[in-house]
Image: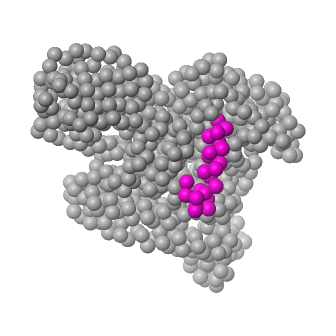
Amino acid sequence: MNHLLTSHWAIELPSDHSTAQFAAHELRRALQRMGGPVLPITGAAAGPRIALRHGPDGDGFVRMADERGLVLIGEGPRGLLYAVYSLLEALGWRWIGPGPADEHVPRWAQIRLPAATVAEQPAFARRGLVIGHDLFLAQAEAWIAWAARARLNTIFVHTIGTSGMPLGACRWRYWQQRRQRLWPLIEERGLRLEIGGHHLRDAVPRQLFRQQPDLFRHDGRRRVTSGNPCPTNPATQAIVRDWARGLFAAEPNASVYHLWPEDRLGGGWCVCSRCAALSPSDQSLILVNVMAAALAECNPTARISFLAYHDTFAPPQQIAPAVNVEVVIAPRQRSYAAGISDTTNPVNGPLAEQIAALRVSFPAGASMFEYYLDGILFKSALPPLGPTIAADLRAYYEWGLDGVHVLLTGDRPWLAVGPNPHSFAALAWQPQRESAALRGEYAATRAPATAALLDTAYAALETAWRHALAIKPADVRRQHDGHRRDPVAHPPRDILDSYDTPPPHCEQRLAALHEALDALPAGEAALAAAQHTAVAEQAALAADAAEWSASALLLRFLAARQEAAVVQARRAPLARQRQALAAARAAHTDLLNWAARHVPPPARAGHRLLRMLLALHLDQLESRIALPWHSARLRWQRWRELVLLLARLWWQWQR
């Protein structure tokens, strides 16, 4: 049969399922945008047709030609939608991000439908985008549309209640405001909704402490309101159960609820006489099981998660999970320079055994919570992580994990999303794809005329970041989250902040950062050549170039900060130490100047807070060589800046 599309064709869909109907209309709109005819959608076509069929459930699909045209069969309605998007990709469509600049729409004088048979199944049953900041929740329409086109099947809205700071999560109140608009978009695409975050502190209000201090944890000396509640107290359990029941009733559409303990590296658990023998994982699971019992009563098909994260990364030893409790594994303290299964990597190597133990401990299911789109972890940058994402997802598939999620968060909206979203989505569907080819697809979609140059620039940046992210166990040990500390004297530090580790590691870290800087010139030259060549693509290239330069400036700051620490550790002359600190201050100023040009006003306070933490690191180094009066003045100045920034953020959150 001739598969040339004409106005005599139709889209045949006997199903009235809303997702199947959406798939048919997506197909009709897309064919029209490509230059094809406007096809009627009918339950039974008399002539040539694109037949759409689906079974009860599933994401797999088959596409094949027959004597009347083309047949697309999805295992379920969502599988049919993916079959439509697969057909459009075969015709030249590309979606590598959430905006019009991340979409390539082919134009054809004639559209010839592919006759080859295609059958596909996803590697992971759950493939999720985690929307983790108000900035991205404001853009959620575009992200939801992209997620479906990229064959992700879960939208996880990562929230925080009124008792926490929404620096890496969406305010619960803002989600409630947006839900009426966003839930229909999620539902019509057949996507799953997951909801929640570090909400356990909301379950037991701090106002109860005066009347019922036993609800709260014992820190070894007394009961305190910081950290998580006392999990073995029956009164605590009753309050948590009632609170969870109310939340489940208020959010009935979720398939998985995430009601996690406080976000801290450690020390937030109870050591009272009943709890002292229980590990953090056991204490956490006690309350998860309490909430699971309430969930089973009001929504038997839904599940609740146990978060394996920081000090709950070890499997529970004394408490068994309820049948509707699954595990979400969040390996944030890892090296992103290598795949998580790299046994030669001193940071990642031990994680494989722990992940396997967690998978066995939670038979209801296990999924990974990854950070490839985390602008907070990577300090307001998005390092290209294609080889790491590919290695990780191959390992997660081989280890039998049920799902993979990626956290989208940060302190500012991205000017260009870079290759990571496209790489993650493609590899979550088929982990054997080549990361370099996926990076090339991103470049070809963003700037077709200069794709090779843009790809070269991102390849150079990928190399640079691989050196910068090659952390060692000493780097992990230097991390702390700032809880119960003076944030000016002891600012929070993350995986990129091991600037004052003991020698010789401190100098090895500097050498690695210099290798990162050595990789940048090739990328800068490629970007400059692309911008000089492609007049028609200047807008897209300008956005990618701005994000590229943000990464380069950050890497230069990290190297300058490390050099200041190394010079100080060597006990160099004071003049040399001050010179190194001045260079690091100048690199920090370059970051602020970039922000003045590219960060929109609504995001500036949050971005400035993240950049202020870097300035506090330099203050820490300077305080060791400065005169006491100078250190005191600098400390007062930073406190003033911090208070003003937090007041501005608080005002934004209240509005």
The residue under the point 26% across, 31% down is 64
Q: How is the image coloured?
A: one colour
Q: Is 272 in the magenta? A: no
Name the spot of residue 491 as percent of width and height, x first.
65, 58
Name the spot of residue 246 as percent of width and height, x first.
64, 21
Name the spot of residue 94 as percent of width and height, x first.
29, 43
Whether 479 is drawn above or below 8: the answer is below
**Residue lying furthest bottom in this view?**
573
Displayed quadrant of residue 249: top right
Q: Is 349 in the magenta? A: yes
- Tally of numbered discs: 0
Is residue 189 something one can see in this rendering?
no
41 displayed left or right of 109: right
Whether 156 is drawn above or below 291: the answer is below
Residue stretch rendered in magenta on the structure: 341-362
Query: Looking at this view, is 506 or 617 the one in front?
Result: 506
Whether 610 is drawn above or below 514: the answer is above
Is residue 1 something one can see in this rendering?
yes
The residue under the point 53% across, 37% down is 402
42 displayed left or right of 365: left
Name the spot of residue 353 as percent of width and height, x first.
64, 50
Q: Which image quarter holds the N terminus?
A: top left
The residue under the point 72% across, 40% down is 316
7 displayed left or right of 651: left
The residue under the point 68% across, 71% down is 502
Query: Looking at this view, is 152 or 555 the one in front?
Result: 152
Query: Looking at this view, is 501 or 82 the one in front?
Result: 82
